[in-house]
């Protein structure tokens, strides 16, 4: 079950952060191999020939691709510690639904904000709507997973490292519209397993400023 | 056939996503009520709006009144709740591979068919993209009878309903899948021989009629 664990990574990618969060929550030792996304190397191209994207988890020489699939794999293989998905099939289906909701919305809306095009205003409105919907789903729970970090927390939390970037490039405040969600972010960041796995939002913003062109900002 | 209490699917006849759920239920030998939404464009039922408030879409699967939404998630739920026969491989790596291909199919296939049948003129780029996707799936299939291996399973269920739209794509696009991707075509025929699949899928000619009607409605034709 242990064996060799390698993660093909890019430090600023919220998708790669999901894998790191899951590994960190479970206390799994792994080797992190940062990839050059502008000049993809043979290891990445061999490990993910279909999409050629990070993250890729390589466990005992076999590749697993797509961040949420990687997180599910980690959860199943290391099932005895910090389970991320509920064991009850119905509750599991609900967690999968909300993680899928995050997947369908947050990255694309965030990108539409930070590339600063004509549809930025609409994207801002939609992002706030989505985050409010997620706030409602969180309700009075400490975490989406209940008393501990769960699958939906892992799916959404990495995007919080990009909130400062969305807010600054879009000139709006997520804290103002979604205070409960921001409180959830801060609560999560207090956990060492989370603060180890996630970069500081300022670092993400600095990265954004440096690589605007590569990120699609005209 | 075993009868489990309160299984209901909110359905629309042409939706390949609804058909996935029906095939999964059929594979498990379960009886269910198939409730048709007659008008997705104007008059969605209250039950649909209440049980899927986020997307307001079919399919919705209700198990003793508790809703599960999103077809791939529903199929997973059915597999986990009624374990026989299993639709996913037993090992974690095999399951990760199955989920990867289900995700690939979800991301690529339906949109690629739409790029062909929604196009006024014959779109060569769209045709090439579509064929490319099927060829990728042929590679994933390899020499196996099914994506799942020797037995029909999860990825097969996710993929097969989409093939009902291929006749429309072939007629509008001016090519045949059998010629371009014979392996994929053989896999399709193999799946259609299964009763669980055959009774869940519509006649591709009826889907083609639906596509033509949709094109007319949208002013494409």
Image (tube, rainbow, N blue to C red):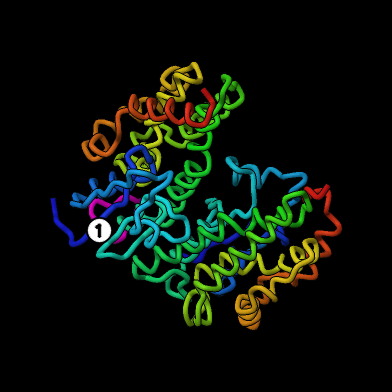
Relative side of B52 to A9, left or right: left
Viewer-nearest residue: A125 or B217: B217
Viewer-nearest residue: B126 or B77: B126
- Please identify the residue farthest to the front as the structure is shown: B42
Residues rendered magenta in the picture? B80-91
Q: Chain of mark 1?
A: B
- Residue depicted at 50% across the width and 56% down the height: A69
Secondary structure beneath label 1: loop
Q: Position of residue B12 (x, y in %)?
A: 34, 43
Residue A192 visible in this rendered orientation of the protein = no
Residue A55 visible in this rendered orientation of the protein = yes
B83 magenta-colored: yes
Q: Main secondary structure of the magenta part?
A: loop
Relative side of A14 to B132, left or right: right
Q: Position of residue B191 (x, y in %)?
A: 30, 33
- Please identify the residue farthest to the right as the structure is shown: A210
- Residue depicted at 69% across the width and 75% down the height: A175
Q: Position of residue A2 (x, y in %)?
A: 50, 66
Q: Position of residue B190 (x, y in %)?
A: 29, 30
A12 magenta-colored: no
Viewer-nearest residue: B52 or A211: B52
Mark 1 sits on what residue?
B82
């Amino acid at each position: 079950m242990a064996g060799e664990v390698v993660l093909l990574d890019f430090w600023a990618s919220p998708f790669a952060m999901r894998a790191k969060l899951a590994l960190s929550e479970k206390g799994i030792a792994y080797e992190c191999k940062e990839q050059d996304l502008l000049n993809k190397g043979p290891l990445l191209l061999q490990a993910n020939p279909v999409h050629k994207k990070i993250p890729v988890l390589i466990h005992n020489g076999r590749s697993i691709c797509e961040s949420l699939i990687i997180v599910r794999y980690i959860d199943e293989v290391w099932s005895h510690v910090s389970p991320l998905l509920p064991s009850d099939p119905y509750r599991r289906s609900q967690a999968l639904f909300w993680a899928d909701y995050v997947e369908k919305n947050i990255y694309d809306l965030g990108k539409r904000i930070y590339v600063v095009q004509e549809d930025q205003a609409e994207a801002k409105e939609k992002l706030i709507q989505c985050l409010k919907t997620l706030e409602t789903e969180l309700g009075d729970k400490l975490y989406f997973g209940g008393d501990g970090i769960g699958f939906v927390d892992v799916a959404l939390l990495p995007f919080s490292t990009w909130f400062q970037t969305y807010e600054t490039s879009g000139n709006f405040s997520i804290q103002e519209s979604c205070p409960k969600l921001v409180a959830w972010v801060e609560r999560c960041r207090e956990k060492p397993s989370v603060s180890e796995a996630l970069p500081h939002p300022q670092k993400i913003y600095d990265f954004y400023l440096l690589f605007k062109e590569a990120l699609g900002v005209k | 056939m075993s009868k489990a209490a309160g299984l209901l699917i909110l359905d629309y006849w042409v939706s390949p996503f609804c058909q996935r759920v029906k095939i999964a239920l059929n594979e498990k030998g379960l009886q269910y009520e198939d409730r048709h939404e007659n008008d997705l464009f104007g008059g969605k039922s209250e039950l649909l709006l209440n049980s899927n408030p986020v997307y307001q879409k079919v399919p919705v699967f209700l198990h003793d009144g508790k809703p599960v939404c999103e077809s791939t998630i529903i199929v997973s739920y059915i597999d986990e709740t009624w374990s026989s026969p299993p639709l996913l491989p037993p090992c974690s790596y095999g399951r990760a591979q199955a989920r990867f291909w289900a995700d690939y199919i979800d991301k690529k296939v339906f949109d690629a068919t739409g790029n062909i049948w929604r196009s006024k003129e014959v779109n060569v780029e769209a045709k090439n993209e579509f064929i490319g996707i099927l060829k990728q799936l042929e590679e994933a299939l390899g020499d196996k009878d099914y994506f799942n291996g020797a037995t029909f399973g999860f990825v097969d269920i996710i993929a097969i309903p989409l093939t009902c739209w291929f006749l429309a794509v072939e007629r509008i696009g001016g090519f045949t899948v059998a010629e371009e991707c014979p392996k994929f075509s053989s896999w399709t025929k193999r799946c259609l021989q299964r009763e669980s699949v055959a009774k869940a899928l519509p006649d591709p000619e009826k889907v083609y009629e639906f596509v033509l009607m949709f094109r007319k409605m949208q002013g494409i034709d």
